[in-house]
Amino acid sequence: MVGIKYLYARLNHQNMKKYFQLTLLAIVGLAFSAAAQQKTTAKAEIKTPTIQCDMCKGRIEKYLMRQEGVTSVKVNVKKKTTAVSWITDRTNIENIKAAIATVGYDADDVTAEEASYKKLPPCCKKPASEVPKVLE
């Protein structure tokens, strides 16, 4: 009877040791994979001088958040700027500016697409005194 108890205790100890080793290995593996998945991000503040109202803000934020790699967008209507964060291996600042222009707004040195600008509601268009002859 003593032999069976000893054998059972020994097997139980070996199983616990294997279980502990596997658990430790899994934790270490997860830690390394999480560290390898960290992504490099960048931030920029883009001048968007043609935004006029909260509707403009909503359009830009909604459109940019659909772009691959963009992690956050904050449009400031009063300052006429757009703060953007993105994952650097998925997009870049030029793609983001082009996306803003696609919606119909100027972005730093990138001019709004004429067709998109014409589709904007009247409240989102520049006042008549600011509109260049090309966009009229």
Image: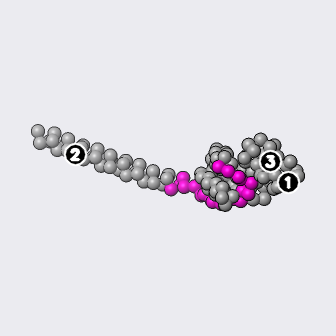
Residue that extends furthest to the left in the rendered view of this protein: 1
* Disc 1, SS: loop
Q: Is residue 67 visible?
A: no
Reading the image, the residue beneath label 2 is 10
Nearer the observer, 5 or 136: 136
Residue at 72% from the left image edge and 56% from the top image edge: 48
Q: Give the image location of residue 105, x and y in percent.
A: 75, 51
Mark 1 residue type: Pro
Mark 2 residue type: Arg
* Disc 3, SS: loop
* Disc 2, SS: helix
How much space separates mark 3 and mark 1, taking CA atoms?
Answer: 13 Å
Reading the image, the residue beneath label 1 is 132
Mark 3 residue type: Glu
| Residue 79 left/right relative to 25 | right
Q: Are marks 1 and 2 in contact (CB under 8 Å)?
A: no
Reading the image, the residue beneath label 3 is 113
Q: Give the image location of residue 88, x and y in percent.
A: 64, 56
| Magenta highlight on residue 51 | yes
Q: Nearer the viewer, mark 1 or mark 2?
A: 1
In the image, the segment drawn in magenta is 35-54
Q: Give the image location of residue 89, x and y in percent.
A: 65, 53
Tag 1 or tag 3, which sits nearer the N-term?
A: 3
